[in-house]
Image: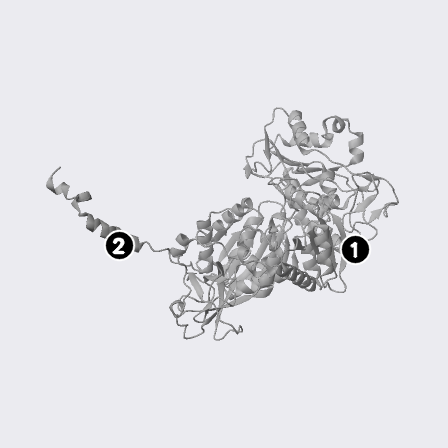
Amino acid sequence: MSSDNGQGAGAGGVPPEQLALIRESVRRARTPRAKPRTWRGAAPAKERPVARVLVNKGVLHLDRYFDYAVPEELDEQAQPGVRVRVRFGAGRHHVREGRREGGGLVDGFLVERVAESDYSGPLAALAQVVSTEPVLSEELLGLARAVADRYAGSLADVLQLAVPPRNGRAEGKPSPEPLPAPPAPEPGSWGRYAQGVAFLEALATGASPRAVWNALPGPEWADELARAVAATLASGRGALVVVPDGRTVARVDAALTAVLGTGQHAVLTAEAGPEKRYREWLAVRRGSVRAVVGTRAAMFAPVRDLGLVAIWDDGDGSHSEQHAPQPHAREVLLLRAAHTKSAFLLGSWSCTVEAAQLVDSGWALPLVADREQIRRAAPLVRTVGDADLARDEAARTARLPTLGWQVVRDALQHGPVLVQVPRRGYVPRLSCTQCRAPARCRHCAGPLEAAQDAGPLRCAWCGWDETAWHCPECGGFGLRARIVGARRTAEELGRAFPAVPVRTSGREHVLDTVPAAPALVVSTPGAEPVAEGGYAAALLLDGWAMLGRPDLRAGEDALRRWIGAAALVRDQGAGGTVVVVAEPTLRPVQALVRWDPVGHAARELAERAELGFPPVSRMAAVSGTPEALASFLAGTELPPDAEVLGPVPLPVTGPGPSRRPGAPPPGEHWERALIRVPPGRGAALASALKAAQAARMARGGAEPVRIRIDPPDIG
């Protein structure tokens, strides 16, 4: 050992006493991580030192603004509309140097700055301004509040749907410069409609027409929708289009690009990644683009100078949001049109009862083609009823009617053939065996269902036991319920045409397009791919499985799905033929044969008005355990003209990820009550239910009760 080493030098020749000093300095530097600032003793902002914040708690009894002090250092950043973080939940005893401290950090939005607070005690300070990007405008806030009130929900929950999560990388990039407004487009195929050209001219001149558009069959609807958007942009205003799914978004996106060119519109869908979605959303908010197309995630898109809101196929279940408070895109766009005084366009091949009500009330005008145009554009529709099936030997053995087999065989020589089969899980409701009229309750006109223990019939709405039912239409006493397997039907079709390729489109794998070559395309409703040049024919099987569903909208929805498939078939002049296997005397089947969805919806509306059904009346569904539901109903001050139907037991949900949103927890026995009010009382009903739910949540410890305004499936 050398003399130097003998002195105990450390690593690198550093004396040990110096190493000790280094260790001590490092030890002193390792202070605990600083907590978010409490701004203890900080001077308040000189002007408007109080910030009103919407705290992202999402519970009804906290559905209000909370006041916070604005430190002088955050004065420039803390502007209305920005995201902030605040401390929430501190009591009055956590006060130091005039500032309330404690509580947990939660996110929120700064709504406004004021000079004084209505709260008399000390205020907590804003902990942090997360971003200086003003994402919450006054217009968007007003819309979100209207939606929350209509659906008995909280403002924070609605803003969770309206404002996408922040992405720092997307926020840091500038949006492109806005392009000049395009010229007014040519009418194109809008000339096929009686008022189509006038509608486009009104949009281009800055007017705000409101229309319910019954589109002609064929692929032209996407181009027509794009031209309506172009006419709105030509007037210097913005446009918003909401469609059911990503496949439809792609078609409208391509049509907008063809009409407007690139860079004039944005695409907003929930399927896009967080960065791309937020980047597109910011481009819309900043005014870089003034046209938007997307799924229901786009219904709150912050379009500048909104001049047109449009929705396609409003009867599709995808338009109904599954997260609280579960708003429907159609109703949100109706509120936007009313608040911004913009034009409104509801388009579909079919027609919902809600659309018919808009026309019947005079709020919107019909935008339809004359009968001659409809006959030229629609395919030939033929029916196969029960009497035909009973006489048909082929139908009894192969479950394929002879007429359908002949049409498919001839059409396969000219192109692909679409075969629509109901998806699994369709459970028919009861109906008369003679006239097929649905069996309804004498007490509330709800649908009757058979008990599992072979007991008396029971109403699915009010729970009334029916022991002596007879059909009010024909006087019959027999009831019918038929369940038809869709998968086996598809297998039989494949065996009937062994030399033809069979393609399937459904839940597991949805096709977007198919080539024009001959093929059998077996699809569930709503998953039909588009064929190049159109289908040569379509076969709509097992109509009873859709018409007999235990739902108020069974007939309307069956017609919508049939027309959606038939609209993909070539017109009658080109040989297009549709065969529907359903009783030809039924109202939805007759509407399909005549291609008259508007007339069907008008008759449905008149019938529902007579029976007090939605949408003429407003309805809410309240569900929970029997004890919780009874306690909730007893403590709710309902409007005096409200009618409570039920409660009735809900099916017990099994375990697994396929549980429907809002369904009871697995294994629990829940009940549901329906509350119905006359027209014009929907706001009072929503307010009463919201107040009762807020009081229940404020007490704490109570079992959950779920509320849904305007439930889409009420039986």
Categorize mark 1 by other alpha carbons within 10 Å: few (<14), some (14-19), many (20+).
some
Mark-to-mark CA distance, 2 and 1 = 83 Å
The answer to which image quadrant residue 538 occupies is top right
Helix, strand or loop under label 1: helix
Q: Position of residue 278 (x, y in %)?
A: 46, 53
Q: Position of residue 145 (x, y in %)?
A: 58, 63
| Left or right: where 526 falls relative to 388 | left
| Left or right: where 658 falls relative to 643 | left
Q: Which mark is residue 25?
A: 2
Q: In this rendering, is residue 259 above or below 543?
A: below
Helix, strand or loop under label 2: helix
Q: Are marks 2 and 1 in contact (CB under 8 Å)?
A: no
Residue furthest to the left in view is 3
The mark that comes first in sequence, 2 or 1, is 2
Q: Nearer the viewer, residue 464 or 520?
A: 464
Check the image and tell me how it is coloured. Answer: one colour
Q: Position of residue 354 (x, y in %)?
A: 68, 55
Q: Which residue does the numbered mark 1 point to in the structure image?
A: 611
Label 1 sits on what residue type?
Leu
Q: In this rendering, is residue 602 above or below 567?
A: below
* Residue 196 visible in the current orientation: yes
Categorize mark 2 by other alpha carbons within 10 Å: few (<14), some (14-19), many (20+).
few
Q: Position of residue 653 (x, y in %)?
A: 67, 42
Q: Residue at x 43, y 58 (%)?
A: 288
Q: Which mark is residue 150?
A: none
Q: Nearer the viewer, residue 449 or 23?
A: 23
Label 2 sits on what residue type?
Ser
Q: Nearer the viewer, residue 80 or 494?
A: 80
